[in-house]
Every structure is written in C-alpha cells, then in structure tokens.
Image (cartoon, rainbow, N blue to C red):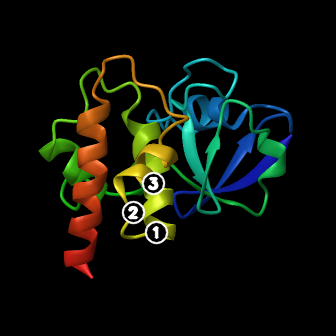
Amino acid sequence: MALALKVNGKSRRVEATPDTPLLYVLRNDLELNSPKFGCGLAQCGACTVLIDGKPARSCVTPVGRLANAEIVTLEGLGTLDNQHPLQQAFIAEQAAQCGYCSAGMIMSAKALLDRAPHPSEQEVRQALAGNLCRCGTHARIIRAVMRAAGMKEKAQ
C-alpha cells in the first residue's frame, strides 16, 4: 500500500502496510539512519523522532497513523555546515561516546527546548528520563542540553 508521509520537511511516498513501525520505514525505505532500533518496546528512546513537535518512539508508532503528521529526525535538524545548537552543544560537550543514543537524546531535548527554551537542569533530566545511555555520558548530555539552551538564547 502506498503511503504519503512528510519527513524532514519533504513529502515522501512509501510502500508499507499501515501497521509497519515508522522506524522500519525511516531506516529501510527512506535511508534515514539516525533513529536506532534499541529495544522495540518503546523503553530505551534510541528510536525517538518528533511527530508534530512531540517526541515519539518510532519503533511502536504505526506508519499508517501519520498521514498528516510532520515527522522530524536528526537528519532534519541541521547539516555539517549549519548545525542545530543541540548538535553543536553535543559536540562541544563530547556528549556522545558510542553515539547509539545520541539521536534520540537530541530529539527529546529539542522537543523540550521548543516548549521551554530556558529549562532547569531538573526539567532537562525529566525530559530525558525515558532515553537510556549505556555508556554513562548522562552528565555530558545534560551539560550539552543546558549549553544548547544558552546557545539558542544567543541565536535569537
């Protein structure tokens, strides 16, 4: 079945059954590799993307429900030449060790900063509580999000 999606600002058509997880379509059909398969149960956050500005676990989100949704992956935030403040901050704080969780963390952080541009550290911790990192870079990730909030403020 042909499905129309809007991903990273572009209209895309894919062949998939409506119950196919969005993650599979993003990775296999659209070749967007930032969302990762972690647990397949919406427990780890590695597959987090934004759907209409809200973080969502793409591993359990049926693609058939997204016909009118705006889907954003890490690839939709910035480029090497024009990085999003969160991408810049993650690099500056060396917040990615293995990098597996980074895209999900950044997407959850983006949703937070979009709704609360000046979050407290506690708000950042709360927003990222559902995103797991096995490398132990949580402190750097928190610093990166706090840095990005400051960078975002300067950019406005």
- Position of 132 relative to 65 (above/below): above
- Position of 46 relative to 7 (above/below): above
Crowding at dot 2, Cα within 10 Å, few <14 / some 14-19 / many 20+, comes out as some
**Percent x, y of residue 84:** 29, 60
Going by the picture, which residue comes out furthest to the left? 92
Q: Which residue is mark 3?
A: 123
Query: At numbered mark 2, what does the secondary structure look like: helix, strand or loop?
Result: loop
Q: Label 2 to label 3, Cα distance in Å?
A: 6 Å
Q: Label 2 to label 1, Cα distance in Å?
A: 6 Å
Instruction: Give the residue type that dot 3 points to.
Output: Glu
Relative side of 52 to 36, left or right: right
Q: Nearer the viewer, residue 5 or 13?
A: 5
**Percent x, y of residue 60:** 74, 32
Q: Residue at x 27, y 70 (%)?
A: 152
- Position of 71 relative to 14 (above/below): below
Residue 132 visible, this angle: yes
**Percent x, y of residue 129:** 51, 37
Mark 1 and mark 3 lie on one chain; the one further toward the N terminus is 1
Q: Which residue is mark 1?
A: 116
Instruction: Give the residue type that dot 1 points to.
Output: Ala
Q: Quarter of the image containing the C terminus?
A: bottom left
Marks 2/3 in contact by CB < 8 Å: the verdict is yes
Marks 1/3 in contact by CB < 8 Å: the verdict is yes
Q: Nearer the viewer, residue 47 or 141?
A: 141
Q: Label 1 to label 3, Cα distance in Å?
A: 9 Å
Instruction: Give the residue type that dot 2 points to.
Output: Pro
Marks 2/1 in contact by CB < 8 Å: the verdict is yes
Q: Residue at x 41, y 50 (%)?
A: 122
Query: At numbered mark 3, what does the secondary structure look like: helix, strand or loop?
Result: helix
> Tag on residue 133?
none
Q: Which residue is mark 2?
A: 119
